[in-house]
Image (cartoon, rainbow, N blue to C red):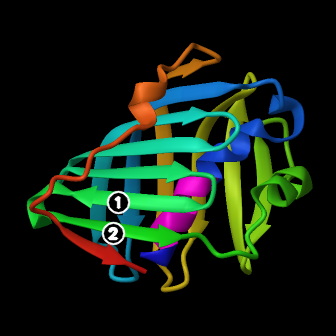
Amino acid sequence: MKSLILSFFFATILFANNLQNINSFEASFKQSIINSSNKEILYTGKIYIKKPLQIVWQYNEPTQKFVYIKNNNVTIIEPELEQVIISKLDKEFNILELLNTSTKISSSEYLATFNNTQYTLTVINDILQSISYKDNIDNNILISFSKIDQNKPILDNIFEFKIPTDYDIIRK
C-alpha cells in the first residue's frame, strides 16, 4: 500500500526542473508491477494532476479503483470491495524538496530519491513519459503515460468525490 501511494506522488515530478511551467497533466497510464518470480500485474487507467497538488488516479483494469490526493490527504475508493481508505501522507514527505533535488542524468532521464528508493523518470520534449523504480519488496514498477495533455484546463469537479453511504470507511 505504501509503495502504491508513493508511486502516485512521483507523477508530480513533471513539475520539477525545466518542467516548472506545467500547471496540469492528464494522461492514460499503464502500471506494470513485476515481482521477483517475473510475474507481472498490469494496471491501466487515467491520471489527472493539477497544481498546486491535486491528483486523481482512475484505475480501470484489472479492477476499478479511484485514488484522490489533495495536499497531504489520500482517499482510495474501491467499488469492488465497497470500501474507502482515508489516510494522511507521511508528515516528513516534502514533494517540493524532492522535485527540486531531482537530477538530470541524460537528455531524457532524471533521477529522484525518496525514502532510500531511486526513481528514474523519462522526459521527452518536456513531457513526462514514464516513471520506474524498485519498491521495498523488490518489485520492478514501470508507469508509462500516453495520450498526454499538458496545461489543458481540467475542471475542478474531476478532483471531487463522494463516498457511498454503504461503503466501509477505513482510516489510517
Q: Is residue 90 magenta?
A: no
Residue 10 located left or right of residue 155: right
Q: Residue at x 51, y 52 (%)?
A: 69
Name the quarter where the C terminus is drawn. Answer: bottom left
State which quarter of the image contains the N terminus.
bottom left
Name the main secondary structure of what is drawn in magenta: helix
The percent position of residue 96, horizontal first and vertical second, equals 82, 53
Q: Residues within 10 Å of mark 1 (few under 14, many from 20)?
A: many
Do the CB atoms of the residues marked 2 and 1 lie less than 8 Å apart? yes
Q: Secondary structure at mark 2?
A: strand
Q: At x 61% / y 61%, what residue is drawn?
A: 72
Residue identified by numbered label 2: 85
Q: Could you tell me which residue is drawn at 72 percent across and 79 percent down? A: 115
Against 9, is 83 above or below?
below
In the image shown, does 29 or 26 lie closer to the viewer? 26
Q: Position of residue 100 (x, y in %)?
A: 89, 51
Residue 103 bears which disc, if any? none
Rendered image quadrant of residue 85: bottom left
Residue 83 location, x and y as percent? 19, 66
Specify start and end residues of the magenta stretch as a single range.
Answer: 3-9
Q: Is residue 104 visible in this depiction of the protein? A: no
Position of residue 14 relative to residue 98, above or below, is above
Q: Could you tell whether 44 is left or right of 61 in the image?
A: right
Q: Nearer the viewer, residue 105 or 69?
A: 69
Residue 153 % position (x, y): 56, 14
Which residue, given by chain and number where applicable, does mark 1 sit on?
Answer: 76
The vertical placement of 39 against 100, above or below, is: below
Q: Amino acid at mark 1?
A: Ile
